[in-house]
Amino acid sequence: MAERDAALVAVGPVPDAQLEEAVLRGGASLSPLDSARALVWRGGPDGFPDPLPRHVEWVQLPSAGVERWFAAGLIPQDTHATWTSAAGVYAPQVAEHALTLLLAGVRALPTHFAATSWNSDPAVVDSVHTLRGSTVGIVGAGGIGRALIPLLAALGADVVAVNRSGSPVPGALETLPTSRIDELWPRVDHVVVAAPATTATHHIVNAHALDSLKPTSWVVNIARGPLVDTNALVDALAAGTIGGAGLDVTDPEPLPDDHPLWSLPNAIVTPHVANPPAMHSRAYADFVARNVAHFVHGDELSARIDPVAGY
Amino acid sequence: MAERDAALVAVGPVPDAQLEEAVLRGGASLSPLDSARALVWRGGPDGFPDPLPRHVEWVQLPSAGVERWFAAGLIPQDTHATWTSAAGVYAPQVAEHALTLLLAGVRALPTHFAATSWNSDPAVVDSVHTLRGSTVGIVGAGGIGRALIPLLAALGADVVAVNRSGSPVPGALETLPTSRIDELWPRVDHVVVAAPATTATHHIVNAHALDSLKPTSWVVNIARGPLVDTNALVDALAAGTIGGAGLDVTDPEPLPDDHPLWSLPNAIVTPHVANPPAMHSRAYADFVARNVAHFVHGDELSARIDPVAGY
């Protein structure tokens, strides 16, 4: 077991029982940083060892996106170490939340929740729809969007994806480049917003987009609040020109107490809980255990960062 | 196109534009019953042609279960015709509703729905769970239960199924016979009830079962109300010994106005809308179009009934 004994892994910046257990589960031994061959990090760039000691061959970072580490100059282009991120680790949980909000809307749960009486009136019964046979637009086909596609496929829904380049996203019926996003709205039954927040995606769901959707369309946002024009959304919800909105993120966020989204019957607001801390920690620990096992066995590590490309 | 011209299909008991369109879509021609080679039925056994004319080679019935047709003596063991049911046709829609109720519970939507303020308190945030890594018990693994398994698999949940015989259900981690159902409750995180209503399944979710579940467990019933002991369920919900219940069927049904299930914050009631009429009709018409196409081309028909076995 020389290989195994030699796999000394440090956890930082502070002791963390869940990650220490994950390191052991992965088949490695715990070690202080000054004798470690690998460093599993939980936290931001602050306090990260700079420069990275020469004996550390592998660094595991806890974020899906690692821009802040590059911005802080912590990952040199000529680094001696292998760096891995947590890309894709949290996406399934967030995709699950997106699906929950979409199904809740399509199946008219807000109406059912508000009911205090058994109501089989056609107005209620006919408000229950299905994702089966529908087309869902996914704006932004990164980890979350890609994790959502097989869930929708299992439910019999088609996906039209939108990404910057328009390069085909696996599992999508079609992928449109952002420049052609206006073709998306009239084609889809529902929209899930899963893009990063950039100047290009600011208010990507605007009044025009909402006008082009169907009166039964649900808009789900699990990405960042400013991707949706909140005022335009409130107008569409109040006018009933779309079916409803399921929002785990809002703009402003937190949503003020007197905001109309709290009282609109076709809005579902969850307080940015798609991937809450306990779920996040467990998913990271499980990923660490798997990646430590790869390290112990000399296998390819998952979610490798490209120090030259910067992601 | 002789084959096609000869495929004369009648729709009964009354004209139905959606089914007539489906017959044409399947490649056949419409015909009155007295010259038809096939009969597509929409309705119950009442008014069904008895005996079935000799020239009718195929009968399509609109129900998944056809006990009533056998009970009425309409399907003789030595029938000259091929009979098909709509078995499996409605299952995906009902499975989608079951998943909606389960996800709504697991993701704490009742709490979020009731909120009128952005609440990031740990009590709220920590009440949001995930199906990922969980084990879901499915009681009754007929069409609906089987349709639910791939949906749960896509979300990273395992399934333990229960059926009469215990013969393995595809996709389930394990299948228990009904006689061992008491082993199910402590093993699973959540339960979906999808069994037929029989004397053997009456109150199959009883006080003992509920006591054996976890304080975070959701119980979903999309089958028949009497499968769950409502009084025991209300007690468990009020005491918080389970996480909650999502019910599309109730006992009594309709649920009276003053019933505690309307006010318990961890109960979601939908008024038997898992497969509402419009969705039902569309699914049946799509199935009819496909089966008519099989008939036209002389291919094997879907959902054949065994006149001797009686189902």
Image (tube, coloured by chain):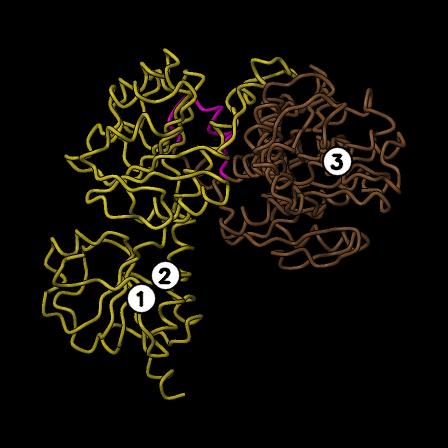
Chain colours: A yellow, B brown
Among all residues in the image, which is located at the extreme front? B2
Quickly name the residue at label 3: B228
**Which chain is indicated by disc 2?**
A
Query: Residues at badges 1 and 2 in contact (C-beta under 8 Å)?
Result: yes
Question: Foreground: B68 or B33?
Answer: B33
Q: CA distance from mark 1 to mark 2?
A: 7 Å
Q: Is residue B48 above or below residue B60?
A: above
Quickly name the residue at label 1: A11
Among all residues in the image, which is located at the extreme bottom? A2
Q: Is residue B204 in the magenta section?
A: no
Residue B160 lies, in percent from the top left, at: 65, 54
**Which chain is indicated by disc 1?**
A
Residue B138 lies, in percent from the top left, at: 67, 47
The part of the chain drawn in magenta is B107-119
User: Image check: A134 left or right of B274?
Assistant: left
**Which chain is indicated by disc 3?**
B
Quickly name the residue at label 2: A16
> Which SS class for mark 3?
loop
Query: Residues at badges 3 and 1 in contact (C-beta under 8 Å)?
Result: no
Q: CA distance from mark 2 to mark 3?
A: 43 Å
Q: Amino acid at mark 3?
A: Val
